[in-house]
Amino acid sequence: DGGITQSPKYLFRKEGQNVTLSCEQNLNHDAMYWYRQDPGQGLRLIYYSQIVNDFQKGDIAEGYSVSREKKESFPLTVTSAQKNPTAFYLCASSIGGGIAYNEQFFGPGTRLTVL
Amino acid sequence: GENVEQHPSTLSVQEGDSAVIKCTYSDSASNYFPWYKQELGKRPQLIIDIRSNVGEKKDQRIAVTLNKTAKHFSLHITETQPEDSAVYFCAPTNAGGTSYGKLTFGQGTILTVHP
């Protein structure tokens, strides 16, 4: 389980504020992912990155932004444009780099609550 | 994109019974079929996977079977134990193409094993 961390564990935000969720990995993985988890809806992909300085929108990217300036880090910003941001956010990483059948390793998650 | 459905959404069994969760998908190009397990309060973890050139794979008490013609695959757990209680997610994937490395998760099945 070690190797991919997320902070903070719990985060509270007032409406209208942007907030950034941290995701760090020391697994030397090329690919990183952000998911949102809501009850009864499984894991939905927000953004993913296969390599440094490159990322793609997932299925529910509206109201979110990311950056991938370092291999180890893939922060997610939840902007005020996200209409329903209260959720559990999971970051994951995988070997990537041309290996398609690759296990995704998940972080412990951040629970965001908008007050 | 891939449409994924899991059935049932909840499953309750007695310890020692078997449990079967079915995952139906829409993309005939899918060729990689993993199952992830998420225990309460913990991160998802890969428990078993199968590729399209194999019809069945077994690992101790868990197995996965694939029916590519009908576009579904199933998770089988035998001799269930209370520690099998968790949410199980399938994530059928086209390991190549433009969805390279990206997983589309089902909505999850909550398995409860009663002692």
Image (cartoon, helix red, strand yellow):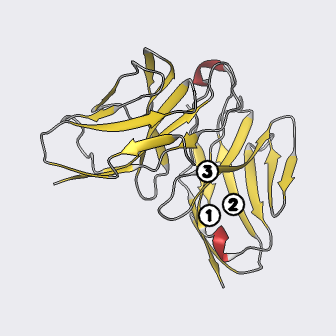
What chain does mark 3 sit on? B
Which is more N-terminal, label 2 or label 1? 1
Q: Can you tell which quarter of the image residue A75 is in?
A: top left
Name the residue tied to disc 3: B45
Report the side of A21 relative to B74 (left or right): left
| Residue at 81% from the left image edge and 45% from the top image edge | B67
**Marks 3 and 1: same chain?**
yes
State the separation of the CA atoms marked 1 and 2.
Answer: 7 Å
Report the side of A33 relative to B38 (left or right): left
Q: Position of residue B75 (x, y in %)?
A: 74, 57
Which is more N-terminal, label 3 or label 2? 2
Q: Position of residue A4 (x, y in %)?
A: 50, 40
- Marks 3 and 1: CB-CB under 8 Å? no
Query: Is the residue marked by circle 2 packed among few (<14), some (14-19), or many (20+) residues within 10 Å?
Result: many
The circle drawn on residue B8 is 1
Q: Which element type, helix, strand or loop, lies under badge 2? A: strand
The circle drawn on residue B23 is none
State the separation of the CA atoms marked 2 and 3.
Answer: 17 Å
Q: Position of residue B55 (x, y in %)?
A: 87, 44
Name the residue tied to disc 2: B21
Front one among A33 and A6: A6
What chain does mark 2 sit on? B
Q: Pick out the residue farthest to the top.
A: A53
Q: Which element type, helix, strand or loop, lies under badge 3? A: strand
